[in-house]
């Protein structure tokens, strides 16, 4: 698998790349590393462990729980809950560590392990590196220092996690959702119970799709990566809007009452203006990545909101927000972080806040989202190439320069290796969609020839 930790934890095909042995070993390593840096000092350590509904999550959860308990960590097993719920519970319960088993929007055969530090924040890169190094050291034969007797960890189910998280979501809303009809696509994932319950408690009339997980159907033709069904259902039911989550519900995309997609950039635009009205947008600043649409940047400039851009990955958005005290940030893909109420992207919270703005203003989501105009943007994924050379290939560098000369000031090019999948992403923006497609296709061909 190369470096185990990507931009969002450890991912791979469950029981092939991501085995029970790896899950157990990483969990023990995480416990030892956190112990070494003083996280557990002076008290008996506790971890919160949750998962999405994937079938492989069942055995991987068992491995993680066994690893933590064998290292002397007490475990609160919260079952199937969204990633942001595990982060929230890690913080509110005062746990020393959180572990989420999910591969987010990836197909069912994949799974992943994501660690949270005390407070519910993602682990720093240097701690992930240390965990990986310690895991590798012991995988090759060095014995673990293992507690015995009363020193081993104890395991219990924490059923209260569901209600505690839902109450938190509803409790932070600025206003209720009474009078709204909303279609929710749960991607047969981790929010299948949480999201409908939260929207209903907040006063909305709810129609659900993709809310029957069976362990095999997560993200299968539904959720934030497949919006066609949601579009159709919103129009069919005459709903005010639709909300789509991914498998672990840390992201949110939307559709308006006509079935038009509202992406993460547009959601950030709507929420930024809403939060500024409430004096909640600290420093009148929103944080996004370099993948954000140029139209988003132009809209924020026009509205007097400062935009700070980071590398791709919600962890880098979060780092920038935490360092400077910003309240709102996110990605075009729908990872939106509202730092006053969550330590990570929270798709259910984002959807609730978006719906609250519709209810508060009595304006349609289409009208609210029109604050920004999306410029044509084409994204091409190029698989089966050496993504590690994307920034060092002279042939590719020259092709990018040529494309940038052709686009001039009306567009831009971005090439990056995926942090979670074995591919290179080619993004091209232009004033004209056909030009964007042509340039993107040409660059994709160069990526194949130069890195293949």
Image (cartoon, grey):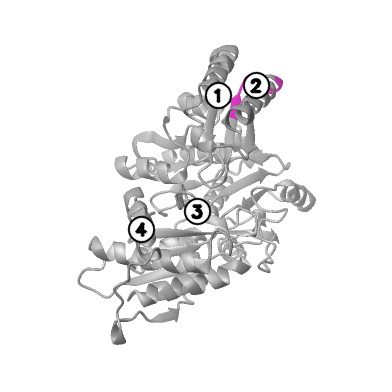
Location of mark 4 (residue):
131
Residue 352: horizontal and vertical position, in percent?
Answer: 55, 53
Mark sitting earlier along the chain (2/4): 4
Location of mark 3 (residue):
346
Query: How far is mark 3 from mark 2, CA to CA?
Result: 34 Å
Left or right of 200? Residue 145 is: left
Contact, CB < 8 Å: mark 1 with mark 2? yes
Task: Please state the extent of the stretch shown in magenta in the rendering.
Answer: 427-434
Tell me, yes or no, if residue 335 can be seen here.
yes
Tell me, yes or no, if residue 373 can be seen here.
no
Q: Which mark is residue 247?
A: none
Secondary structure state at the residue bearing disc 3: loop
Q: Residue at x 57, y 36 (%)?
A: 424
Query: How far is mark 2 from mark 4, CA to CA?
Result: 41 Å
Mark sitting earlier along the chain (1/3): 3
Left or right of 327? Residue 236 is: right
Q: Residue at x 59, y 67 (%)?
A: 56
Mark sitting earlier along the chain (1/2): 1
Query: How far is mark 1 from mark 2, CA to CA?
Result: 9 Å
Q: Which mark is residue 439?
A: 2
Residue 223: horizontal and vertical position, in percent?
Answer: 66, 53
Magenta stretch contains residue 415:
no
Image quadrant containing the C terminus: top right
Q: Vertical placement of 123 versus 27: above or below?
A: above
Mark sitting earlier along the chain (1/4): 4
Location of mark 1 (residue):
413
Q: Residue at x 39, y 49 (%)?
A: 339
Neighbour tally class for label 3: few under 14, some 14-19, many 20 plus, Cα within 10 Å:
many
């Amino acid at each position: 698998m190369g470096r185990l930790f990507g931009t969002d934890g450890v991912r791979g095909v469950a029981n092939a790349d991501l085995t029970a042995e790896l899950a157990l070993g990483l969990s023990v390593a995480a416990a030892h590393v956190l112990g070494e840096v003083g996280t557990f000092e002076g008290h008996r350590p506790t971890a919160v462990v949750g998962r999405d509904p994937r079938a492989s999550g069942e055995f991987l959860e068992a491995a993680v729980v066994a690893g933590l308990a064998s290292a002397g960590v007490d475990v609160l097993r919260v079952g199937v809950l969204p990633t942001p719920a595990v982060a929230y519970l890690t913080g509110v319960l005062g746990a020393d560590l959180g572990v989420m088993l999910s591969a987010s929007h990836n197909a069912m055969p994949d799974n992943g392990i994501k660690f949270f530090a005390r407070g519910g924040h993602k682990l720093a890169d240097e701690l992930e590196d240390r965990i990986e190094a310690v895991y590798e050291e012991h995988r090759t034969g060095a014995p673990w220092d293992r507690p015995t007797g009363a020193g081993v960890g104890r395991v219990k189910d924490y059923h209260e996690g569901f209600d505690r998280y839902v109450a938190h979501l509803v409790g932070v809303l600025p206003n209720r959702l009474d009078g709204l009809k909303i279609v929710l696509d749960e991607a047969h994932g981790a929010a299948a119970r949480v999201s409908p319950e939260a929207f209903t408690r907040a006063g909305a009339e709810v129609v659900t799709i993709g809310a029957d997980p069976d362990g095999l159907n997560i993200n299968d033709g539904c959720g934030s990566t497949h919006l066609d069904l949601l579009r159709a259902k919103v129009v069919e039911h005459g709903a005010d809007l639709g909300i789509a989550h991914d498998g672990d519900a840390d992201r949110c995309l939307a559709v308006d009452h006509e079935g038009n997609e509202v992406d993460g950039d547009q959601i950030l635009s709507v929420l930024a203006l809403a939060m500024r009205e409430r004096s909640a947008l600290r420093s009148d600043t929103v944080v996004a990545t370099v993948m954000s649409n140029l139209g988003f940047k132009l809209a924020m400039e026009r509205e007097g909101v400062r935009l700070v851009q980071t590398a791709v990955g919600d962890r880098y958005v979060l780092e920038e927000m935490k360092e400077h005290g910003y309240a709102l940030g996110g990605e075009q893909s729908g990872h939106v972080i509202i730092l006053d109420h969550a330590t990570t992207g929270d798709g259910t919270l984002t959807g609730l806040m978006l719906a609250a703005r519709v209810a508060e203003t009595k304006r349609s989501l289409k009208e609210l989202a029109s604050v920004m105009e999306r410029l044509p943007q084409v994204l091409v994924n190029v698989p089966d190439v050496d993504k590690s050379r994307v920034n060092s290939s002279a042939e590719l560098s020259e092709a990018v320069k040529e494309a940038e000369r052709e686009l001039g000031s009306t567009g831009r090019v971005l090439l990056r290796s995926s942090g979670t999948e074995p591919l290179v992403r080619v993004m091209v923006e232009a004033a004209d969609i056909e030009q964007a497609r042509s340039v993107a296709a040409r660059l994709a061909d160069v990526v194949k020839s130069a890195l293949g």
